[in-house]
Image (cartoon, grey):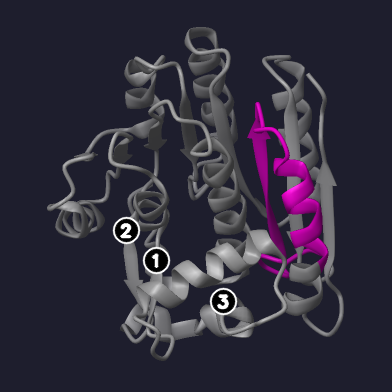
Amino acid sequence: MLSYLHGFHAGNHADVLKHTVLTATLARLVAKDKPLRYIDTHAGAGGYDLNALAARKNREHDSGIGQVWQSTDAPAAVARLLELVQRYNSGQSLRRYPGSPWLARELLRRNDSLYLYELHPAEHRALERNCEHDRRVKVLREDGLIGCLGLVPPPHKRGLLLIDPSYELQNEHRLVIDAVVKAQRRFATGVVAIWYPLLERRWVDRFERALRATRIAPIAVYELGVAPEGRDRGLVGSGMFVINPPWQLHDDLQAALPWLAEKLARDGDGTHRSLAELG
């Protein structure tokens, strides 16, 4: 479980999809005045050097953020992410890619709070360094799927829980569902965003059916495929389940997904799926 390092995959197509959904969700949530609590169960290092050995090994960012980061025709939800990536690079060449903690810190306000969980010792140290001057942030070296339960409901009853595991464990999707069910029992109106990999369609379908079978709350799905699915083809896409999606989020992402599928597809084989469930 502690062998996964996101630096090998930073800025790939899955990051672009995940962070488009994340920043669009946060933008809708901060439109209201009340304070917001942001909880990240698998926060990583907080940001990544694309010239580091890990990132250069497979250069996954070249076919991800590298394809779109200077685009001028992106839909609003994608354009927001691209502006943040450009800001993270100080308007220069693409040398770094921000993790979800940095993106959340940029979009959240002075009266909001962030709780960032990371178990990997090296990643945890990097995350602490990246956040050490931000008083809104608490960095915790604990199991985020367990720790998050003690943070809900927030005082102002407004929160976003991001769950972004590596799914290295065979039953990790079950651990995710169990944590979400427990969190929703305590905080039924909380927004939860769950990232998942698209390696095998049957696995995704089982995960989605099991999540919907809990009947905890409305669930939206936003999925991006960059290549045809098949055995041993590797990561050909990813998706996000959003529980209790904010108002108008679906409109934002319906415009973004076709554009991403066109720009990030391998050999023109991009696909996308969006599904909103009404409460």
Work out whether mark 1 precedes mark 3 in sequence or the reverse, and give the earlier one.
Answer: 3
Q: Where on the picture, by quarter, is residue 126?
A: bottom left
Residue in the picture at 42% in, 25% down = 34
Work out whether mark 2 precedes mark 1 in sequence or the reverse, and give the earlier one.
Answer: 2
User: Tag 1: residue type?
Assistant: Pro
Tell me where residue 239 appears, x and y as whole percent: 69, 50
Q: Secondary structure at mark 3?
A: helix
What is the C-alpha distance between the residues marked 1 and 3? 11 Å
What is the C-alpha distance between the residues marked 2 and 1? 6 Å
Residue at mark 3: 65
Q: Which mark is residue 24?
A: none
Q: Nearer the viewer, residue 244 or 40?
A: 244
What is the C-alpha distance between the residues marked 3 and 2? 17 Å
User: Tag 2: residue type?
Assistant: Gly
233 vs 91: above or below: above
Q: Which mark is residue 98?
A: 1
Residue in the picture at 34% in, 50% down = 105
Q: Secondary structure at mark 1?
A: strand
Residue in the picture at 50% in, 48% down = 168
115 vs 212: above or below: below
Q: Are marks 2 and 1 in contact (CB under 8 Å)?
A: yes
26 relative to 139 in the view: left or right: right
Work out whether mark 3 precedes mark 2 in sequence or the reverse, and give the earlier one.
Answer: 2
Tell me where residue 154 appears, x and y as whole percent: 37, 18
Tell me where residue 77 appears, x and y as whole percent: 65, 59
Q: Which mark is residue 46?
A: 2
User: Tag 3: residue type?
Assistant: Ile
Residue in the picture at 56% in, 80% down = 69
Tell me where the magenta segment starts and ends, as one range: 229-258
- Examine the structure image and report whether residue 235 is included in the region drawn in magenta: yes
